[in-house]
Image: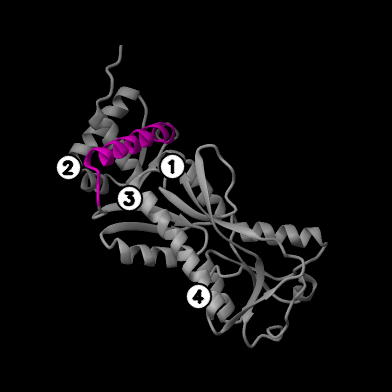
Amino acid sequence: MNASPNPYQIKAFTFVARERSFSRAAHCLNVTQSSVTQHVAKLENQMGTQLFIRRREGVELTRAGIELFKITDRLATLDQLVMEKINDYSALSEGNIRLIANAPRPAMPIIAKYGELYPHVQIDFTLYDWTSAMSLLNERQVDMAIVTEPSDSETLVTHELRRSRYMAHMRSDHRLAKKAVLSLEELQSETLVLPGDGSLTQKVAQSKIREYGLKFPRVLKTTTFPMVKEALLHNLGVGLLLENSMYPSDKLVAIPVEEMPEDYRDCVVIPRDKKDLRLIKSFLGVCVEAVVSEESNSVGS
């Protein structure tokens, strides 16, 4: 009969999986890296399988590691909830939130506001395409995400922040920039600038193009939203993007598109068992406040 893994082995594995690094896991646990390495090695020994693929740039979970992490991360979250109840935190003086988004806005204004209110909480923020963002959420690789039209899941909790529609973005000196409304047909002669594969924007745009039987002979695909903005600023084409998904620029304009009247939800998405963590609840509160403030400023301007 195999011996049960001890709590230290489970905790070491969970933090290495969370941080994708043995050294960062050791720092989080306030122990030596060799201690973390030994605990993980003993756990792999007991299970008779490798949990991590060690690479120069970090570690990657194996299939067995992914399955185990889905369980152990829940245990770590429950442990954190218990500690919060015991200590009854009255203020947030430290902590770490792993946050991702599929567009710079509304995520970045929210992060800025949260940093003002809770300067000692560390936020690890990365932009991903929509498909990768949903995958990371479902695999519990992040604490929360701000994504557009998230897919439904019983393991996730969704809070709608705002709604927006797709518009044609272009340089303010573009030949079509003075139009009140544009049609996709008018845009066919332009180079269409889109985020890369896996993005919701690319899926929506391609779906609309097929629906109306149109052809765009020139499509420029970029890796991220910031790259889309750079392409537009350099007058490389016209982008189909959600309104307010990028930081405003007086060099760019956004024009409604006749065939794209639908509203799309920007949402905060949280693994269900993390929703009551004090850090998560505080961030969600700031999300709502920041979006309301931004919309009020837009109306007033």
Distance, label 4 to label 2, CA atoms, is: 47 Å
Residue 172 vs residue 140: left or right?
A: right
Is 89 inside the magenta-drawn segment? Answer: yes
Up the image or down, 50 lies above or below 96; here it is above
Question: What's the residue type where badge 3 is placed?
Answer: Arg
Residue 41, image x and y in percent? 27, 32
Amino acid carrying label 2: it is Val
In the rendered image, residue 244, in percent from the top left (x then y), is placed at 56, 70
Q: Which callout, 4 or 2, points to the residue nearer the camera?
A: 4
Q: Give whichever of discs 2 and 1 has the lower sequence position.
A: 2
Give the main secondary structure of the magenta stretch. helix
The amino acid type of the residue labelled 1 equals Arg
Q: Is residue 276 above or below residue 122?
A: above
> Disc 2 designates what residue?
31
Write down the residue under mark 4.
297
User: Helix or strand or loop: what does disc 1 sit on?
Assistant: loop
Please, what secondary structure does the residue beneath circle 3 have? loop
Q: Which residues are magenta?
A: 66-90
How far is disc 3 from disc 1 in space, using C-alphas?
23 Å
Residue at the (44%, 59%) spot, across then down: 287
Residue 148 visible somewhere in the drawing = yes
Q: Residues within 10 Å of mark 2 (few under 14, many from 20)?
A: few
